[in-house]
Image (tube, helix red, strand yellow):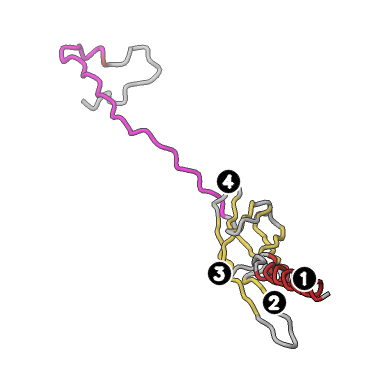
Amino acid sequence: MRRVISFSLAGVSVLGATSLAGCSSMSSTSWNMFKSAPPTVQVRLESNPAGADATTSLGQGCKTPCSVSVPAPDVPFTVAFALPKYQPVSVPVNVIKNPGDFTTPASVTTDPNPVFAELQPAVPPKPVRKPHRLKKPKPAAPATAPAAAAAPAAGSSFPDPNTGKR
């Protein structure tokens, strides 16, 4: 009987040792189930004119006006606004974390909220003008030309304004 009891005690101790060893070798990811999820914050995105593509530096994006839920980062992030025929705008966003205490829960806010961008029309490029070319002067009439050829015809309805001034 003594052997049966000693074998059973040895079996229990081996079983206990392996179960304790199993606990100590649990990966750190299994302890993550006890951690709370990182806080997220809702950020409202608006632009004038509406319909711009707004993208956060954290990866989330939408067409304005809209809201995105972003994980609360430890550092500020930016929101880039883009719309065809308008100049792109980037707006910095600060993250404000209030740790809370026994009476109030922790909170995370952003400044500004809503994030607003005033988009300016893109200035069209100025047209490229061709350089002005000087015209070649016309050759002068030969000096031997008769003066009568320069005078108006006798039956012209327009009289010569220089008549009598010579």
Gap in angstroms between the C-alphas marked 4 and 3: 32 Å
Magenta stretch holds residue 123:
yes
Q: Position of residue 22 (x, y in %)?
A: 69, 67
* Residue depicted at x 59% and y 67%: 93
Q: Does residue 66 appear in the picture of this structure? A: yes
Q: Amino acid at mark 3?
A: Val
**Residue sitting nearer the eye, 131 or 138:** 131
User: Dot 3 corresponds to which residue?
Assistant: 75
User: Marks 1 and 2: which is nearer the front?
Assistant: 1
Answer above or below: position of 96 versus 118.
below
Dot placed on the residue nearer the N-terminal end, 4 or 3: 3
What's the mark number on residue 107?
2
Q: Amino acid at mark 2?
A: Ser
Q: Judging from the image, what secondary structure is the residue with disc 4 in?
A: loop
Dot placed on the residue nearer the N-terminal end, 3 or 2: 3
**Residue sitting nearer the eye, 83 or 159:** 83
Q: Which residues are magenta?
A: 120-149
Answer above or below: position of 119 versus 40.
above
User: Dot 4 corresponds to which residue?
Assistant: 85
Gap in angstroms between the C-alphas marked 4 and 2: 39 Å
Dot placed on the residue nearer the N-terminal end, 4 or 1: 1
Which residue in the rendered view is the most extreme toward the bottom?
Answer: 102
Dot placed on the residue nearer the N-terminal end, 1 or 3: 1
Task: Tell me which corner region of the image, top left, top right, bottom left or bottom right, holds residue 159.
Answer: top left
